[in-house]
Image (cartoon, grey):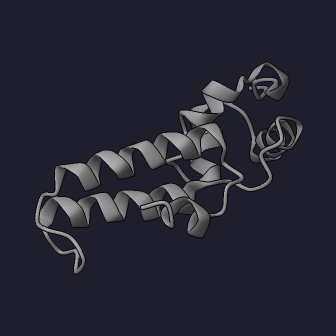
Amino acid sequence: RRPRAAVALSREEIAAVFHLPRRVAAQELKTCVTLLKRRCRALGIKSWPFRKVRAIERRMVRAMTGGQAEGTAGDGAMLEALHGKKLTLAQDPNIRLPDLLDEQ
């Protein structure tokens, strides 16, 4: 089986799997890791943002369960803000996580 040509992958297709580790994302996209990395570089994505997405998702879970020290349990505004940050990360995966989270 030949891997899917990475040139055919759009930024939207790649962004849809940012929540997965790079190797699993490559399998989902039916390509190999090397071709995925090459396509990401061609699109200007410097590093795979899986850990950034996971950090935001952990904060969302803490906000929902009330395990967050600075907020109130189930704070809807906090969840809304974190969801917006996740979307921002999908649009600009090169943004530094501290810069993204400092906006809170």
Residue 91 percent across, percent down from the top left: 62, 37
Pick the residue in front: 19 or 79: 79
Q: Quadrant of the N terminus?
A: top right
Q: Is residue 101 above or below residue 84?
A: below
Q: Is residue 19 left or right of residue 73?
A: right
Instruction: Name which residue lies at 37% across and 45% down.
Output: 83
Q: Is residue 3 left or right of residue 72?
A: right
Is 55 located above or below residue 44 in the figure? below
Question: Residue at the bottom extreme?
Answer: 69
Question: Which residue is at the front of the view, 34 or 45?
Answer: 45
Give the residue drawn at x 16%, y 57%. Answer: 75
Within the image, what quadrant is residue 31 found in? top right
Looking at the image, is 72 positioned above or below residue 46?
Answer: below
Camera-nearest residue between 68 and 53: 68
Residue nearest the observer in this picture, 45 or 91:
91
- Of all residues, the one furthest to the front in this rendering is 103
Q: What x and y, as percent, mark residue 6?
A: 80, 28
